Image (tube, rainbow, N blue to C red):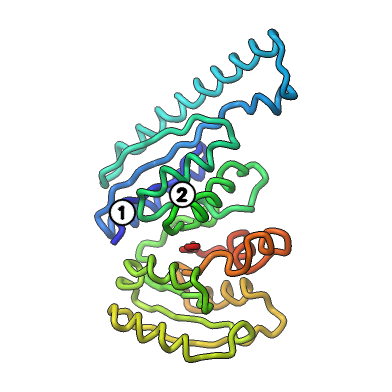
Amino acid sequence: MFKDLMLHLDGTGEDEIRLAHAEAIATRFGAHVTGLYANPLPDYMIAFGGEPGFTAMGAVVEMEERARAEGDLVLARLEARFQRLAAPHEIRRIAAQRMDIPRLGASEARWADLFVASAPYRNSETYVGDRLLEAVLFEGGHAVCAIPPGQRPKADSRNVLIAWQDTREAARAVAEALPFLRQATKTRLIRVAAQDSQAEPVMDVAAHLDRHGVEVEIMAVEAENRTVAQILIEEAHKMSADLVVMGAYGHSRFREWILGGATREMLASSDVPIFMAH
C-alpha cells in the first residue's frame, strides 16, 4: 500500500501535472504527499574555471543569493498551492549545486513508497529533473512513476499493462505495483516473444498474481522488426492502458545508455505513465 508519496517540484508548469498525479494516487490510497523542491544553485567551479579570484567570489555570492531569492518565491507559490490539497502534505527543499541534487534527492526518496517525476529525455532544459529521476530509480530503493509531460491523470485509471521479462527488475516492478494491480479493472501481461521463448515463467507470474487477487490476461507478441518500446506503446494504446509496469534497465546500465534500449526509449517516447523499478 502506498502511504508516502514524493514528487519532484522545480517551479515549472509541469509541477501541476506531477502534483495532479500524486494527488490522485494519494486520494486512492490515503497517502501523505511530500513535494521535493529542487532549487539549483550556481556551479561555481564550472562558472569560474575552478580558480575564482576576489572579484569572482563576489559574483559567486551574488549569484547564489539571487538563486536562493528566486527559490524563495517559487517555494512560496508551491506552499500556497499545496494548501489546497485534500491529502496530508509537506514540502522539502533541496538548495544545492546541480550535480548534488540527484544524490540528495535519492536520499530523500528512500523513505517514500513511490516517487512521481516527469518522464525524462524529452527536453534539454530538464537536465536536473532527468538526472534526479535516474538517481532515485537506481539509488532510491523504491519505484518511480514517470509522467509524460502535459499528461494529466484520467478520472479513473484502472487499466494496467505489465511488460514482462524474466529479470529481477521486472519482478521488483510487479511486486511494487501490487497496490495498483489489486485495484485494476483490466490487467494484461505482455511478453515479447523474441526476447524469451519460454512461456512457463509467464504462467507462473500470472498464477502468483492470481494468489494476490489480480486477474491477468497473458499475451505474447512477435517483434516483427519493431522495438520493444514500440510494441509496448502500441499495446498500451490498444487496451487503453492508464499505466505501464516494467523493470528498468534489464541489460547493463552502460549498454542502455550508449546503445539505447527498451527502458530509455519508453521513458523518452511513451505517452502513457510508466511505473518502473530497478
Could you tell me how far apart the alpha carbons at marks 1 and 2 are, in whole angstroms?
A: 14 Å
Instruction: Residue 17: give its label.
Output: 2
Q: How many marks?
A: 2
Residue located 64% across and 10% down the image? 58
Q: Amino acid at mark 1?
A: Ala
Residue 210 picture quarter = bottom left
* Residue 112 circle label: none
* Picture residue at 28% right of the left edge, 52% below the top: 31
* The quadrant where residue 63 appears: top right
Q: Nearer the viewer, mark 1 or mark 2?
A: 1
Q: Residue furthest right?
A: 49
User: Relative to 44, does residue 132 appear above or below in the rendering?
Assistant: below
Q: Secondary structure at mark 1?
A: helix
Q: Position of residue 225 (x, y in %)?
A: 72, 81
Residue 26, numbered circle? 1
Q: Is residue 3 left or right of residue 100?
A: left
In the figure, 116 relative to 265: above or below?
Answer: above
Residue 193 position (above or below residue 30): below
Which numbered disc, 1 or 2, marks the residue that appears first in the sequence?
2
| Few, some or many residues within 10 Å of mark 2 (<14, 14–19, 20+) | many
Instruction: Indicate the amino acid at tag 2.
Output: Ile
Q: Nearer the viewer, residue 244 or 239?
A: 244
**Which residue: 51% across, 65% down?**
272
In the image, taking residue 61 as reference, residue 113 lies left or right, namely: left
At mark 2, the secondary structure is: helix
Foreground: 108 or 155? Answer: 108
